[in-house]
Image (cartoon, rainbow, N blue to C red):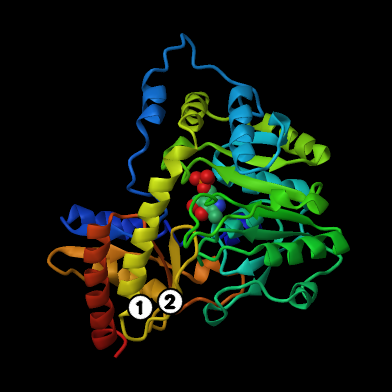
Amino acid sequence: MDISRRGQTVQASPIRKFKPYADAAIADGVKIFFLNIGDPDIPTPKPILDAVRSFNDPILGYGPAQGFLELRQAIAGYFKDYGISLKADNVLITLGGSEAILMAFATVADPGDEIIIPEPFYTNYNGYASLAALKVVPLTLKVEDGFRLPPAEEFEAKITPRTRAIVLCSPNNPTGTVYTAEELGRVVKLAVKHNLFIIGDEVYKEFVYNGRRHISLLEFEEARDRVIVVDSISKRFSCCGARVGAAITRNDQVYAAMLKFAQARLCPPTIEQRAAIAAYKMGMGYFEPVRREYERRRDVLFEGLSAIPGVVVRKPEGAFYMSVRVPVRDTEKFVIWMLTDFRLDGQTVMVAPESGFYGTPGKGKDEIRAAYVLNEDDLRRALVVFRAGLEKYKATVEK
Ligand SMILES: Cc1ncc(COP(=O)(O)O)c(C=O)c1O
């Protein structure tokens, strides 16, 4: 008996699939610096943990499918602080931003339809496109061009009668690019011209550096009906395990469809929504010190990686990742070797190979994604270990 073709071909996450090698190394007493996953070491704020601990209802019951009104109002209030006007009924609470991606894909497109995504892109778009049976049409960006969005004609060359949406992630995972108003405006114009949806993944909204401001697709009045924003508290409040996100749209038809999908999975987690409400009560003052901390980490990792011969990297403008070209032929093999064979004083580093962040087969084989989610001291040490590993790999395995 065969399983579905989707089940057979769905991509394993390049962020997680080598974890068994890491677990084996840990069991051997090895210390691993985890730069493979965006799971920050910044402590989850106390009000969030307190809200979890103080849950004292007699029954841990279901909540509404669209999430608690108080949380949806809190999110609308948070966007208001950024000058974006939303109603609570534009906000649908999801199981992390992850479920918002799936809901958006399933709502705008039918099986076999196409979505255009600039690559490299957040790897799990591939997994969710498989789940929703959509075809990802990648548009390749290059480190040499700073991963900027290409001219409209390059997008138009990818549009077919089956194209339903363009997916933009800004600040970008894995490139760290923050799109300008002009770049976003270019895509908005295209979407209007070709009657497409735009799915805007903005889960790193707070993490923008060098004094720049994040611009949301929700700011484009002419795209009011076309935009679905993927939002999440995971990175915003350093609470990835809470699994609370949101799909945000001003298109009532889109919202109604997403709500029906949401009813099928009953409701988002009750206790974690309470924690999210407590998070938003902290106010906007919480973000600036955290943003500064990531900016410092970015500088440490960027300087360290840039100093390694043969490494090509560009300074990210936002989020907490770097897309890095390294002088090896196949970074999947390199990542495994780092976990199984390489130790420097009992330590090694785990990064994510980047080929799974592409839709084009064969691309990204000489690239990794590194996440600057560790404190500065750990990052500095991880750089020493990483560099020693890379040099040894080149001298012994790929000589
Ligand atoms: C760009 C992007 N979107 C969405 C997500 C989903 O995160 P979560 O489901 O924890 O909100 C992530 C997680 O790393 C991400 O990097």
Left or right of 243? Residue 252 is right
Residue 50 has which mark?
Answer: none
Q: Position of residue 231 (x, y in %)?
A: 59, 44
Q: Secondary structure at mark 1?
A: helix
In the displayed structure, would residue 69 be above or below residue 134? above
Around disc 1, counting alpha carbons within 10 Å, would you say few (fewer than 14), some (14 to 19), or many (20 or more)?
Answer: some
Residue 313 has which mark?
Answer: 2
Q: Disc 2 to disc 1, how far (Cα)?
A: 6 Å
| Image marks 2 and 1: residues in contact by CB distance under 8 Å | yes
237 or 209: which is nearer to us? 209
Mark 2 is on which residue type? Answer: Val
Around disc 2, counting alpha carbons within 10 Å, would you say few (fewer than 14), some (14 to 19), or many (20 or more)?
Answer: many
Going 74% across and 77% down the picture, which residue do you hit?
154
Going 15% across and 55% down the picture, which residue do you hit?
29
Q: Position of residue 351 (x, y in %)?
A: 36, 65
Q: Is residue 341 visible?
A: no
Residue 306 has which mark?
Answer: 1
The yes-or-no answer for disc 1 within 8 Å of ligand 1 is: no
Q: Is residue 238 visible?
A: yes
Of the image marks 2 and 1, the number of the one nearer the N terminus: 1
Q: In the displayed image of the protein, which residue is found farthest to the bottom?
A: 399
In the displayed structure, would residue 39 be above or below residue 90? below
Q: Quadrant of residue 10?
A: bottom right
